[in-house]
Every structure is written in C-alpha cells, then in structure tokens.
Amino acid sequence: MDERRLWVRTVCAAFLVWLLSAGARGADPPSTEFWPEIDTWLRVSNAWRLSVFVPIAENLDTHYREGNLILQTDYAWSESNRHRRLVDEGRAQAMKI
C-alpha cells in the first residue's frame, strides 16, 4: 500500500511541475518597461502620518501606460521618541572609534 501511495504522489508531483512549466513555455518575450514613482510622506502630528504613493509604468515597446494612486495613513499607538535614534547613532559612532 505504501508503494502505491508513493507512486501516486510522484505522478502528482511530476504533473504539477509539468503544469506550472507549461505557462512559462507559452509566455511572451520580455519587453522593456519604465517604472517611475513618487513616494511622499507628510507628518501631520506625532501620532499621524500621511503617505501618497504614485507608481506609473510604461511599456516602451507598445507604449501602454498604467498608473496607480495609493493613499495611506499611519498611526503610532505610543509616544514616539525621535531623539532616541540620534542618541543611538552617536553611541554607535563612538564605538567605531
């Protein structure tokens, strides 16, 4: 019974590999694309931060263009300590010397 189960698993795995590689065989040739983007952060308060992310893509072969506009907000649940990073960097520089 174990030999039959092993044989079935082997056949299923081989079929899965063949199925997944079938998509790669029929794929389009690679094309040249250009992907500029804008990523902007605006701190509203110590707790709130707004983000605007605008990626744009253009296929240079077909001149097809596509873009997205992503708006995001972040909220910090606890009081953030901005000066801690600077203190740690200063201590790290002193350790390097």
Image: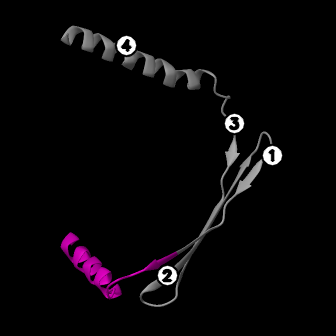
Say left or right for 57 vs 3.
right
Alpha carbon distance from label 2 to label 1: 35 Å
Residue beneath label 4, please?
A: 11
In the displayed image of the protein, which residue is found farthest to the bottom?
A: 45
Q: Is residue 69 magenta?
A: no
Alpha carbon distance from label 3 to label 2: 37 Å
Residue beneath label 3, please?
A: 31
Q: What SS does tag 3 mark?
A: loop
Does the residue at mark 3 contact the one at mark 2 (Cβ under 8 Å)?
no
Q: Of label 3 and label 2, which has the lower sequence position? A: 3
96 vs 27: above or below: below
Q: What SS does tag 2 mark?
A: strand
Picture quadrant where residue 8 is located: top left
Residue drawn where x is 27% and y is 84% of the image? 87
| Callout in the foreground (2, 1) | 2
Total labels: the figure holds 4
Say left or right for 29 vs 75.
right
Residue type of the residue flagged with mark 4 = Val
Residue beneath label 1, please?
A: 63
How far across and down, in percent of the image, does residue 43 sit?
A: 50, 85
Residue beneath label 2, please?
A: 49
Residue type of the residue flagged with mark 3 = Ser
6 vs 92: above or below: above
Q: Of label 4 and label 1, which has the lower sequence position? A: 4
What secondary structure predominates along the stretch shown in magenta? Answer: helix
Q: Is residue 83 magenta?
A: yes
Does the residue at mark 4 contact the one at mark 2 (Cβ under 8 Å)?
no
